[in-house]
Image (tube, rainbow, N blue to C red):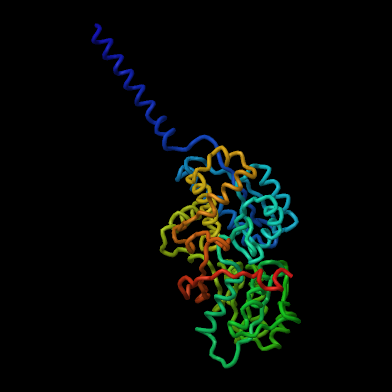
Amino acid sequence: MQKHKLLIGIIICLALVVVALPMLTACSGGTKEGTIKIGISTPSTGVAAEKGRPMEDGQKDAVEYINNELGGVNGYKLEIVWRDNGYDASQMSNIVRNFMDEGCVMFSTSSSAMMTAAMGLANQNGFPGLAAFSSPNLYRPPQHIYGQLPDYGDDFVAFMKYYLENVWTGSGQPKVAIEALANSTGQGAVDAARAFAADLGITVLWDGGEGQAFQHKADTISETEALTRIKAMNPDVLYIASTPAPAALIIKNARELGMNNVTIACGHAAFTSKLVELAGADAENVYGVYPTVNWGDDVPGMAKAVEYATKNHPDDIGNNDYLTSWAQSLIMAKSIETALNNGVSYDVLAKGGAAAWKAIEEQGIQKLNYDVGGLEGPITYTPGDNRLSKSVRVFQVVNGQISALTGWIDAPVVKYEDFSWFGQ
């Protein structure tokens, strides 16, 4: 009888141990209690929604992947505080204040224009921001705003070098006209043209004095008048620094005016599958610069992005803006992970505020050494250079598809603040 009771007791104890094991495993290696907040703002409505919606999708899908498949960041779930900015700069100060008040450790924007509106308050408070698409004004000189990718000035220089080496067959200097969106998206290309025209050996066709590009608004309905003036100047290159919808309109207007012997190129804010869709056959042979791999390229990070887009947002398949924003969330997560691995406590990050922002910046962002699955160039911080990735590629629309023409082209840091005209 005593042996029987002893056997029953042993069985009960073993059962309790078996039940407890999953709990112990979860506590030691699974998801931990608590979250870490990040702020995300995208232009998901308004005049740039063709970019904002897929970028919202990509960022949120990547966080879903991080939380559900990777167990969060060092076991802590990421919590998104998301705000639609409608591509309206007047909204950004309130959005940034909200991110800070909500306890976010850092924040991101899709566009340079919205980060331009946000950076004054962010820099004043030491609140680190990550812009997916950027212009030199965001971090020259470097403060608390970082560029996920090379900037619009880097695009212009990279394309002009490619053009001079591989396309231009004329004599003398090629003449280049810039159609620039009337915000930092356009200004980045303008700044690069002013800084490097002489070194490159090109003649920039200004709309008046030096630095005055042909400008358009995001909601433009016709650029025929400006393009007629450009055509009369007999350009060799029409470089469009804009977003997909106005860039597609400019391309169509240029074709309608018979500018078929002019080489057309776009900076990376415009050069996506949405541009090709909107411009249709008129996009054929248009060049572009983009700082990520192409959709479906054989790199390790592509499979999960394709899986989540297919599952959650099939309309985004083929859109490189989705890939860019997917990578943006991964970089934010890696910044937090790096900070935690460098001794920053969860309690500091969970509380938010100045201590968390300083920790994320100094122990996270500024110590990054990260390969985002090959989706873009290596992510590294270099003192004095707040661009985290520093290489681009040149593409062209061929048979209705965006096709890569080059491998990665390094974009060296440019100290635009050394030019007397910068920011004026």
Quarter of the picture holding the N terminus: top left
Q: Say which of 287 and 388 sits in front.
A: 388
Quarter of the picture holding the C terminus: bottom right
Query: Relative to 37, is 88 on the left or the right?
Result: right
Query: Relative to 104, is 74 on the left or the right?
Result: left
Total count of labels? 0
Q: Position of residue 375 (x, y in %)?
A: 47, 61
Please determine whether, in this image, residue 314 is positioned above or below residue 14: below
Q: Where is residue 315 in the image (x, y as percent from the top left)?
A: 55, 58
Q: Say which of 89 and 212 sits in front.
A: 212
Q: Where is residue 211 in the image (x, y as percent from the top left)?
A: 71, 77
Which image quadrant for residue 366? bottom right
Q: Say which of 356 and 44 sits in front.
A: 356
Please determine whether, in this image, residue 385 is positioned above or below residue 40: below
Q: Is residue 140 visible?
A: yes
> What residue lies at 61% left-to-right and 67% top-to-bottom?
269
Q: Position of residue 218 (x, y in %)?
A: 71, 67
Query: Relative to 66, is 181 on the left or the right?
Result: right
Please determine whether, in this image, residue 370 is positioned above or below residue 15: below
> What residue lies at 64% left-to-right and 70% top-to-bottom?
416
> Which residue is outermost to the top?
1
Q: Can residue 252 be seen in this view?
A: no
Query: Relative to 27, is 346 on the left or the right?
Result: right
